[in-house]
Image (tube, rainbow, N blue to C red):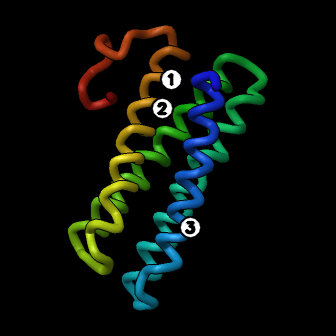
Amino acid sequence: MGDRQELDERLLDYGARVIKLVEALPRTLVGRRIGDQLLRSATSVGANYEEAQGAESKGDFVHKLQIALKEMRESHYWLRLLINARPLPSERLTDLLDEATQLRAMLSKAVATAKGKDKSTKPESLS
């Protein structure tokens, strides 16, 4: 399986895992609000990655990849917040957070490659 196909499948699996996690969150005000934000951002990653595959230009491709990365960063944040707030046992979240970290790195590399830049030349705040 190629890198693109592997990333595609991992993003799909990530979205499905987040759906299951959100369904397990407590039905409190906080659980619903964070769950909504996490669900929106985590499922958006794969959708934007898919849109990038059908981009009409290199600029469009890079833009859609950047949106996927932005959404991955956001979902990573919500997972970290859930681990800190502990509405569920952290063991339930750590594997998913690890996957989010790996996917974020893969998307970051894909954006850098698409832009034709080596990641080491980007300012730290953007990597």
The quarter in which the N terminus is drawn is top right
Q: As displayed, is residue 78 above or below residue 50?
A: below
Label 1 sits on residue: 110
Mark 1 vs 3, N-terminal side: 3
For label 3, the SS is helix
**Total numbered labels placed on residues in the image:** 3
Q: Position of residue 91 (x, y in %)?
A: 28, 66
Q: Are marks 1 and 2 in contact (CB under 8 Å)?
A: yes
Callout 3 crowding tier (Cα within 10 Å): few <14, some 14–19, many ≥20 = some
Q: Position of residue 83 (x, y in %)?
A: 26, 66
> Distance of mark 1 from mark 2, alpha carbons?
5 Å
Front-most of residues 117 and 84: 84
> Distance of mark 2 from mark 3, alpha carbons?
21 Å
Mark 2 vs 3, N-terminal side: 3
Label 3 sits on residue: 19
Label 2 sits on residue: 107
Determine the residue positioned at 48% across, 31% down: 107
Callout 1 crowding tier (Cα within 10 Å): few <14, some 14–19, many ≥20 = some
Determine the residue positioned at 26% across, 31% down: 125
Front-most of residues 9 and 61: 9
Q: As displayed, is residue 124 above or below residue 48?
A: above
Left or right of 53: which side holds 103? left
Mark 1 residue type: Ala
The picture quadrant where one finds residue 75 is: bottom left
